[in-house]
Image (cartoon, coloured by chain):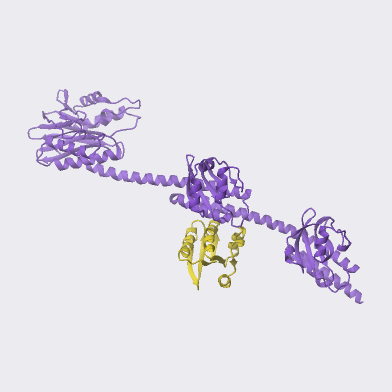
Amino acid sequence: MKKNQKDSYELQTLFDLSKVLNSSLNLKKILNTILLTPMGKLLISKGVVLVEKEINKYKVETLKGLSKELLGQTIKIDQFPESPQFINQLPVSEWVNFFKQNGIALLLPILYDDKKLGVIGFGDKFIGSKFTAPDLEYLFSLSNMAATAVQNGIIFEQLNKTNRKLEKKLQEQNTLSEIVRELNASLSSLKSERVMNLLVYSIMGEMTVNRCLIFLCENRELSLSLNRGFESESLNDVLADSQIFPALVNLRASMVLAKNEENYCFQKMYDLGIRVLIPMKVENDMKGLIALGDKITKLPYVEDDLDFLAILGNWSMISIETARLIEQEIEKQKIEEELRIASDIQKRLLPKACPEVEGFEISAMNISSLQVGGDYFDCIKLAHHLYFLCIADVSGKGVPASLLMSNLQASLHALINTELNLSQVVGRINDIIYNNTTADKFITYFGGILNTDDKTFVSVNAGHNPPYLLHKDKSFVTLNEGGLILGMMPNVVFDTETTHLKSGDRIVMFTDGVSEAMDKDFNEFEEYRIEQCIVENFDNSAAGIMQKLIEAVRTFTKGAPQTDDITIMTIKVD
Amino acid sequence: MEGFEVTKGATNDISVLYLKGYLDAHTAPELENALQKLMDEQNYKIVVNFSELNYISSAGLGVFMGFIEDIRKNGGDIKLSSMKPKIFRVFDLLGFPTLYDILDDEEKAVDKFTKS
């Protein structure tokens, strides 16, 4: 009766144990139960479970009553115990000694379909009595039962590891997509500095490093763009070495630096604390380089890390390049905006409309090729019967020319209303321009004073394309008298030329933007075409002649860009 | 997108940073500034409370890497506390638990300073 009770109790404990074992996937928990249950039941004070890692090699996974130092140790078991096996019945060997020394007396197999999953070891029963046959039977059935659970636990653990790897990959994906998001979400506010920061933070977080260098590469020239954590003095020393940059620029793929690099440069970098080099490439062109120090976790850099860093680096480089382009574009836009403002100011320096002059028609027009130009014309009423009319062309183009042109305009306006005569005014302006500019900057100028009472036009030509004076009979002369180009020499004396205008006379002034306008084969418009045009259109109004001349130039240059300012002024005597 | 906030508190000589919201590359500089400020003020004993942080990217973790060496060199530490499970998961994935003390709550993190 008592024996029956005991048997049924044993069956019950085995059943309970099997329930516990099969309800858990946690290997640690399973192994714990495998040890604790029989230890309690049979009063055993020592227990150990070893799990197979490689063929014949078993790692101490769980233990009870033994030194914790044994955990994780790997033992080579030459003779796997297929059934319960007493240690003292085994021939002496290293692994047998290991168990003996630690007080293990009995080994049991964990076998799953002939697969050797592990070994359970127990010490002697605490009260000194020997293991009985039923004890062994019980322990053996327990170890058989444990096998399924251990197998499940091992698979689960592997799954967990795989899962973790996947999650790590996912985290890397997140980091990459953050870079991409940065690129896409905020193109307008994208700053290369920001991307660089993002890159560095991501690397430091992902790799657990706190030393990081970023180099940028332009036209195969490397420059250090960012340094985190490297001591700058020794870094600069290494970078100053003329061999270093060439070695880095030629790096084709990521590399892990080893302690004893044969290459002098890589050894220097290793000594500095650099452990990996990752080129950043856009379309296979090296655009930058990442250099990292040790991981704080002291783990080595593995292939996966290098792949990740290369992708992260390349993506960041695309962002940095884009950001740079955007920054340049913004800079360009700023300059263009400033030029537009300058152009507005300059246009305001030219008269909006020519004055209504009784008995005369006066028309003028300026077409600028660049946003700001160097051509100038003006009509200033000096008295009820006196008008100052002029046209001028500043050498060069763009901002420098426009600056000089505004200088001319200001001087003219200041001087023309003084007691000085025309010759003196032009002389003074010549000196001002001469003093304000270098020898290669000058102005061609033609201008004069129209007297509407006596119909005279007193003019000075300072090296300007000679204007035409056309008569009713369509004959014409040019107005040449004056002197040197303005700004070439100081103290020039300018002659004046007085023209007595007759009814029907026309004066046509122009800049070299007209005479030197080029067609797409680089032929110039030339003076003879101007003459042809103004003679043909003699009967038109002043504005009409001007329009016809512009049309003729446009037709001639069709398909070619306008390369110079075009300015025309026409006067018609009623 | 959710924003990010760092607020500062203190327990005795231990500074506590409370993080709230979304810590990624955009918001990482705010945390960096806050940590830099503590460094400038020579407050090297720092607890970072994550209880109201809902997202962290690798770049966010990177910020901690940038400071830890200097802080420890000055006899201090950064201790992390009160992470939501998904935040802890990221720290765990990238191997941070071996580098930093990560505690369940702020009190334990502060205690860790006073006891050591």
Q: Position of residue A198 (x, y in %)?
A: 50, 53
Q: Quadrant of residue A136?
A: bottom right
Count of numbered circles in the view:
0
Colour of chain B, in one word, is: yellow
Q: Quadrant of residue A390?
A: top left
Quadrant holding the N terminus of chain A: bottom right
Q: Is residue A42 above or below residue A143?
A: below
Q: Is residue A438 left or right of residue A385?
A: right
Chain identifier, colour purple = A
Identify the residue at the far left of this view.
A454
Quadrant holding the C terminus of chain A: top left
Frontmost residue, A37 versus B113: B113
Q: Position of residue A244 (x, y in %)?
A: 52, 43
Q: Position of residue A266 (x, y in %)?
A: 57, 45
Q: Is residue A505 above or below residue A183?
A: above
Q: Position of residue A548 (x, y in %)?
A: 24, 30
Q: Is residue A506 above or below residue B13?
A: above
> Does residue A72 appear anywhere in the picture?
yes
Q: Is residue A391 above or below residue A234?
A: above
- Residue at position x 42%, y 47% in the image: A327
Q: Is residue A553 left or right of residue A101?
A: left
> Does residue A283 appear anywhere in the picture?
no
